[in-house]
Image (spheres, helix red, strand yellow):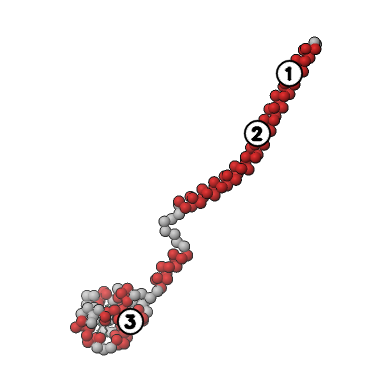
């Protein structure tokens, strides 16, 4: 083997070693880079997911929400005493038309002799019933005060 041949083979061996070393370095750098970025990516994913789930939650939120507040509000309204006009809905079936010869609300002449009996008597007869007039107009769910309010309402419209 000549010296130049040895040099050539040494060179090519060195060359191959260098290429292998550079390849190894490249692989190492790629691995390191992916390690470093995987942490960042994980954090970005996390944030994206957070933002995304929030905006999705906003977008798919129902138009009307039922919170404890919105549920309890109608219940509170339902248990609140009814206004005289609302109570009168239970009485209108007879007292609007005169069914069963009920005194018609607004019929001043028809109501005059009843009003003359005194408001307490009218309350009492409305609450307990009289002849064809059923107790509380047949609506047992009404409180005495609600019936009285309806009587006041009927009387005020019939004077
Ligand atoms: C099923 C029909 C009917 C309904 C419902 C009804 N009434 Fe009457 N009401 C009558 C009749 C009939 C009379 C007349 C009774 C009589 O004097 O003989 C009367 C009479 C009355 C009188 C006069 C009582 C008196 O002493 O002269 C009042 C007050 C009265 N109703 C209030 C009410 C109220 C308040 C309601 C609803 C909560 C109601 N009524 C629902 C049929 C009804």
* Residue matched to label 3: 148
Q: Kindly identify the residue that appears in the image at 33 percent across and 81 percent down.
A: 148
- Labels 2 and 1: the sequence-earlier one: 1
Disc 1 under 8 Å from ligand 1? The reply is: no
- Labels 1 and 3: the sequence-earlier one: 1
Q: Quadrant of residue 104?
A: bottom left
Q: Which mark is residue 112?
A: none
Q: Position of residue 19 (x, y in %)?
A: 70, 24
Q: Quadrant of residue 136?
A: bottom left
Query: Could you tell me if residue 61 is visible in this image?
Result: yes
Q: Secondary structure at mark 2?
A: helix
User: Of 33 and 82, which appears nearest the observer?
Assistant: 33
Disc 2 under 8 Å from ligand 1? The reply is: no
Q: CA distance from mark 3 to mark 2?
A: 88 Å
Query: Could you tell me if residue 90 is visible in this image?
Result: no
Q: Position of residue 143 (x, y in %)?
A: 37, 79
Q: Position of residue 81 (x, y in %)?
A: 38, 76
Please say if 62 is above or below 95: above
Image quadrant holding the N terminus, namely: top right
Split into quadrants, the picture shows ligand 1 in the one at bottom left
Number of marks in picture: 3
Left/right placement of residue 121 relative to residue 10 reads left
* Residue matched to label 1: 12
Q: CA distance from mark 2 to mark 1?
A: 26 Å
* Residue matched to label 2: 30
Please name which of the two marks, 1 or 3, marks the residue nearer to the observer.
1
Please say if 35 is above or below 111: above
User: Of 92 and 61, which appears nearest the observer?
Assistant: 61
């Amino acid at each position: 083997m000549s010296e130049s041949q040895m040099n050539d083979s040494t060179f090519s061996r060195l060359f191959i070693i260098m290429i292998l070393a550079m390849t190894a370095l490249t692989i190492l750098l790629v691995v390191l880079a992916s390690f470093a970025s995987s942490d960042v990516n994980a954090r970005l994913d996390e944030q994206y997911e957070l933002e995304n789930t929030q905006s999705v939650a906003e977008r798919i939120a129902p138009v009307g929400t039922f919170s404890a507040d919105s549920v309890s509000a109608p219940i509170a309204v339902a248990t609140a005493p009814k206004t005289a006009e609302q109570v009168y809905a239970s009485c209108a079936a007879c007292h609007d038309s005169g069914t069963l010869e009920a005194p018609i609300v607004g019929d001043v002449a028809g109501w005059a002799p009843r009003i003359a009996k005194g408001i307490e008597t009218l309350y009492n007869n409305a609450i307990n019933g009289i002849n064809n007039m059923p107790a509380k107009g047949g609506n047992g769910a009404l409180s005495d005060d609600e019936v009285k309010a309806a009587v006041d309402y009927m009387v005020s419209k019939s004077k």
